[in-house]
Image (cartoon, rainbow, N blue to C red):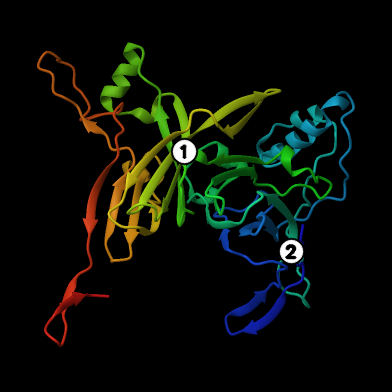
Amino acid sequence: MSSFPSRPLARSRDDGLQLSYQLPHRVYTAQGYPVLAPNGSSIIIYGYENGLKVIWRGGRQFTNRKLSAPKYQPQEKTNRSNDATIMIIDSDDESSVEPQKNEEPSSGFQEGEPEIDPLFPYENVLRQIDIPLGTKVVELAVPRILPESARSSLDPFPPILRKCMVISAVCADLSTRVVTLPLAPPHPAQFEVSSWVQTLSISGGVSHQEIPRGVGIAFTYQASEPQGDEDMAHSQSGSNRDRPGRWDLLVATHSVESSGLLIIHRIPVVEETDRSEVLYRLGEDDIESKRRYLPAPAQNIAFNPSPYPSPRHSTLLVAFHSGCVKVYSCFSMKPYKASRRSSSPQNDFDPSETEGKWLISLYAGFEQSPSGYPGVKL
């Protein structure tokens, strides 16, 4: 794979330095991940002819310790190195007994802030990896999440995002890929990308027949069905955030096929336990898909940045070339049918009904042109 240049071309400007990197291939799309890695590195993702490249820039350097095989379980060498990569992220939250349980040296980071060379006053590239997809990546999307310092510990948060990054990529082979990998940069001694990167492909009958023009992702929560009297009371009072359930990933794509097509996929987040450690991955079996035909091909789509449990977290903004903007609710709740026999108070909405619908359409204003004919205000 082509390597990302470690030394940029620096140009002095009034507001700082402008850094330019001479890349060995064409970049079709790029995104910056909204949160930093556990070691303080900023994360850059871009798509090129053969897949994705993920770059960790700046942050604390790796320690000089080398990875060694476990003493008691040599047959699980690959899995143990994978576990070390994932467990590094929450190393500050682990008890003092945990490091003794894992005897092999892990890919830790140096203490303190890294020093910057005065001759080259910018952050260097710490690590870079290639994720081959076998096709060109034309569009990217990352979740809109706040940094940990700006989030409240009481607010619901997708647990998969605490240790992993989630990336959605639109490819030239008409497929949509969802890639998950650890937030922490892997140690330079780890070369096997397939052992700690999960790639989920959405293609075939549930995908587009034209190359999608855009993609957006967001996380939602699906509460389990009430079974006992206590769960039924929570459901009727509307306190769904306290009920058990599962997190799902919403992936929306649009294309120009027919009059314009919008497809929304709902991918479950599966929880697994591996040697008393809880891991999360995207489920490939229970993916739900919805198709919505548009009056015209969309120009751009974007999910509402409000996180769950806000009712707006699953609303999608769809913009058209004509200047029209529509708001679509992916899972609008249907009102309850009032029952005269029921004496218990009920919530105004039925959480089991999740049919989407268009909420509002906004059109550009009109102004009078000098020729006397009305025109669209730009």
Question: What residue is disc 1 on?
Answer: 205
Task: Using the image, determine if residue 322 lies above or below residue 82.
Answer: below
Q: Nearer the viewer, residue 9 or 130?
A: 130
Question: What residue is disc 2 on?
Answer: 4
Residue 156 in view here: no
In three-dimensional space, the C-alpha distance between marks 2 and 1, rounded to whole angstroms, equals 36 Å
Task: Using the image, determine if residue 325 lies above or below residue 352.
Answer: below
Answer with left or right where residue 293 lies relative to residue 32. left
Q: Identify the image quadrant of the C terminus.
A: bottom left
Answer with left or right where residue 218 lies relative to residue 71. left
Using the rendered view, name the quadrant where residue 128 is placed.
bottom right
Which residue is situated farthest in the bottom direction here? 370
The structure residue drawn at horizontal position 56% and vertical position 45%, both measured from the top left corner, is 177
Using the rendered view, name the quadrant where residue 66 is placed.
top right
Q: Amino acid at mark 2?
A: Phe
Asked if marks 2 and 1 touch (Cβ < 8 Å), the reply is no
Which residue is situated farthest in the left direction here? 340
In percent of width and height, residue 147 lies at 53, 51
In percent of width and height, residue 164 lies at 61, 42
Q: Amino acid at mark 1?
A: Gly
The structure residue drawn at horizontal position 67% and vertical position 75%, both measured from the top left corner, is 20
Q: Nearer the viewer, residue 166 or 104?
A: 166
In percent of width and height, residue 186 lies at 75, 47
Q: Identify the image quadrant of the N terminus.
A: bottom right
